[in-house]
């Protein structure tokens, strides 16, 4: 089992940057693919970026070139660097962990990101 805690959300003007952090506590962190999802009001939760246990990243088309996901397997953290933020990036951002061995999944509590002038 793993517990996830997000931090780093907040408010920023269009064109600004924010960095989100997902800290994982628990065993076998190296077995988990970690992803960032987001959910805006009235919409379904969508995958923003994911990084595998081997540090291979994937991105939604809407954030390619603007967001960067990385992981530190010593500190058990995953970072999402978000640049050139736009109002459509406003959402609650959730950290997600998938254990590729057992199939178990876990969610963090979420952190709000607001992009507005």
Image: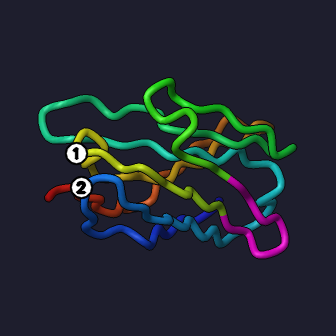
Q: Which mark is residue 115?
A: 2
Residue at x 43% of width, y 64% of height: 18
* Quadrant of the drawing holding the N terminus: bottom right
Residue at x 39% of width, y 31% of height: 46
Tell me the element at label 2.
strand
Which corner quadrant of the image does residue 99 belong to?
top right
All told, the count of numbered labels is 2
The span picked out in magenta is 70-77
Which corner quadrant of the image does residue 103 belong to?
top right
Residue 28 in the image, given as x and y percentages of width and height: 81, 60
* Quadrant of the drawing holding the C terminus: bottom left
Tell me the element at label 1.
helix
Q: Is residue 99 left or right of residue 36?
A: right
Q: Report the front residue among 27 and 81.
A: 81
Residue of label 1: 87
Residue at x 25% of width, y 48% of height: 90
């Amino acid at each position: 089992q793993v517990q996830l805690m997000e931090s780093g959300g907040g408010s920023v003007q269009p064109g600004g940057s924010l960095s989100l952090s997902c800290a994982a506590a628990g065993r076998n962190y190296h077995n988990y693919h970690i992803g960032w999802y987001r959910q805006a009001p009235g919409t379904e939760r969508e995958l923003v970026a994911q990084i595998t246990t081997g540090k291979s990243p994937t991105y939604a088309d809407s954030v390619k070139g603007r967001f960067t996901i990385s992981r530190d397997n010593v500190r058990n953290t995953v970072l999402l660097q978000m640049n050139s933020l736009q109002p459509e990036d406003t959402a609650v951002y959730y950290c997600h962990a998938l254990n590729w061995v057992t199939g178990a999944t876990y969610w963090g509590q979420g952190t709000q990101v607001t992009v507005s002038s």
